[in-house]
Amino acid sequence: MQIPRLHPDTIEQVKQRSDIVDVIADRVVLRKRGKDFVGLCPFHDEKSPSFTVSPNKQMYYCFGCQAGGNAIDFLMQLGKLPFSDVVLELAKRYAVPVQTLEPEQRQELQRQITLRDQLYEILAVTAAFYQHALRSAQGQQALEYLKSQRQLSEETIQQFQLGYAPAGWETLYRYLVEQKGFSVHLVEQAGLIKSRKEGGGYYDVFRDRLIIPICDIQGRAIAFGGRTLTNDQPKYLNSPETQLFNKGKTLFALDKAKDAIAKLDRGIVVEGYFDAIALHAAGITNAVASLGTALSIDQIRLLLRYTESKQLVLNFDADKAGTSAAQRAIGEIADLAYRGEVQLRILNIPDGKDADEFLKTYSPEEYHHLLTTAPLWLDWQIQQMLVNKNLKQADIYQQVVQQMMKLLNNIGNPDTRSHYINSCAEILSQGDARRVSLVAENLMAQLKRTQRAGLVGIATKRSSPPESIPASSESEKLEKAEALLLRLYLHCPECRQAIADILEERDLQFSLSHHRFLWRQILHLQETAAQLELDLISKLQDNNLEFKQEMSQVSPLFHLDEKSQRDISRTSKQIQSAVNRIELVMCEKLSRHFLDLWKKTNLSSDPERKQQYYQEFNDAKQRSMDLEREYEVKFSDLGEI
């Protein structure tokens, strides 16, 4: 539906009621610093936080990329969303009545807005139906299972609103549609019934299953999990995704755990529903569960909102599947953890038990002991590298060294890296104390070679301080190079894949804000539409109404004059030259940055770091010379770009 123009009063109320910290904390890990909050900017890659959110001013600003604005601006820029869509989403979130300037369209708009409320009502009625069924004759087996095998008290069963889905194919359908009078299409949209492929009609999604309601942060049922009581597969079944339920952005029991997480300043993530329920029943109420899929970054960011020091413990099963799940979760969190944005520990319970099994035999105090002694995620990963490995075998030894090098290479903090170099050296020395220092030196030497080889990739991702803005001549070269690359992409569809590939291969990004804006618009369109080769430019020009200022800066790229037509005629050479210039500028910026750090570092108080900065400065300069030599770039040629 095309959204009608919103009334200015609605827009103003949304601006007044929206809490910018609340909005941004959904997507950025924020830490309190004085009166404001800081975090890593979501609009460009950086290792040190330069993104500031002011609750008093209700504004955000990044000192690295100069992005700034209010809550509406943030959501528009981050999600590439139209103004009206963002205002409507915030209006729903903060219960702002929506008025439009076209009265004839209000009814349809109101129907769209209240759809979610209707789905909430249907799911609440369904949860009550399942709870009632648990106490019926049909639900006795399920109730006995909860009390005997799961050892849950009546209080816990009621707290989590556990229920039972009767075995009939249309039991819930008839109750909701025929008895309660809900629209069959709404019940289907709620993920509770499915249409039959043959013969017409509908059937229940959950049948003869123990039911666990999945709630949002406000405690409202948004979906259900169902556990089979027979040998049916799958063992656990979740509701399909709906307008209310996104599996990758929901954590089971977070509504019940959020206060304890905030109070204890630590969250526990387990794999299964009953692991979380068992922990809550044992008084360990800061536990949540993922929903049968790999833990996502969205789930992590949601959880981190409630812990000031960002402490998380992943308690996954110690079997092969649980270890793989932990590794996948670490993969999602790794960037945050390496930067210290998450204080992450991994808990594998002895003998391969999960939390539910453990608490049937041991006390909550013993589980607390396991929590406090759980290894940091880096130590756990090193332990996993050594499982069933005989370091006395040369090939195994080398394999472990390579795995350790990958881990060490990602540690940005020099002190942390030094600690783990020594730790790995002790392991690789296999008890021979005389070899520890030698092995540590070898690891350090390998690490420097690896970092030197990947220096350009680091350069494009590193946050540059405000004083690292390119000199005017350098900025002009960068402007011409980036503009040429974008013009080629727009007007030569056959070159698009080659341009995308070389940017990814050399890990480069557009540095100038207006070019970065255009590139994000292109990527967004390519994600949401097909066959853009014929109308990419026209689709981009449609954005003129919403992004007048930004589009005015890049609109010349949409047109070709005689010179630009000549430029794009030699596409292969021009792509190479443009990418080469962008990379050279990045290396030159990086060398200046490290030279500045080297000058500011005191030799007597921190000789090791001063030496490191000099080495990185030297490496960046060497990389610049290598690039010019490798691609035979001439400054006179680049001036034509």
Image: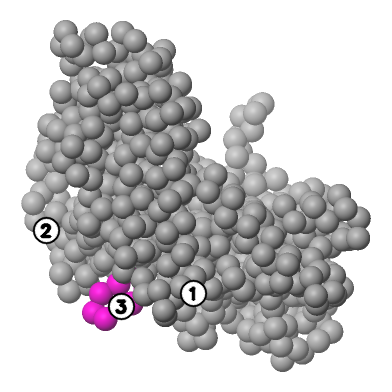
Q: Report the Cα–Cα distance between label 1 and label 2.
A: 34 Å
Residue pictured at 49% horizontal, 74% vertical: 310
Residue pictured at 54% horizontal, 51% vertical: 451
Q: Which residues are magenta?
A: 31-38
Residue 350, x across and y down, in percent: 83, 75
Q: Nearer the viewer, mark 3 or mark 1?
A: 3
As helix, strand or loop, the secondary structure at mark 1 comes to: loop
Q: Which residue is mark 1?
A: 310
Q: Which residue is mark 2?
A: 12
Residue 313 in sight here: no
Mark number for residue 33?
3
| Amino acid on which the number 1 mark rests in the picture | Lys
> Residue lying farthest front?
604
Q: Report the Cα–Cα distance between label 3 and label 2.
A: 29 Å
Q: Main secondary structure of the magenta part?
A: strand
Q: Nearer the viewer, mark 3 or mark 2?
A: 3
Q: Where's the C terminus, which quadrant? A: top left
| Amino acid on which the number 3 mark rests in the picture | Arg
| Residue 563 falls in image quadrant | top left
Q: Sequence-wise, which precedes: disc 3 or disc 2?
A: 2
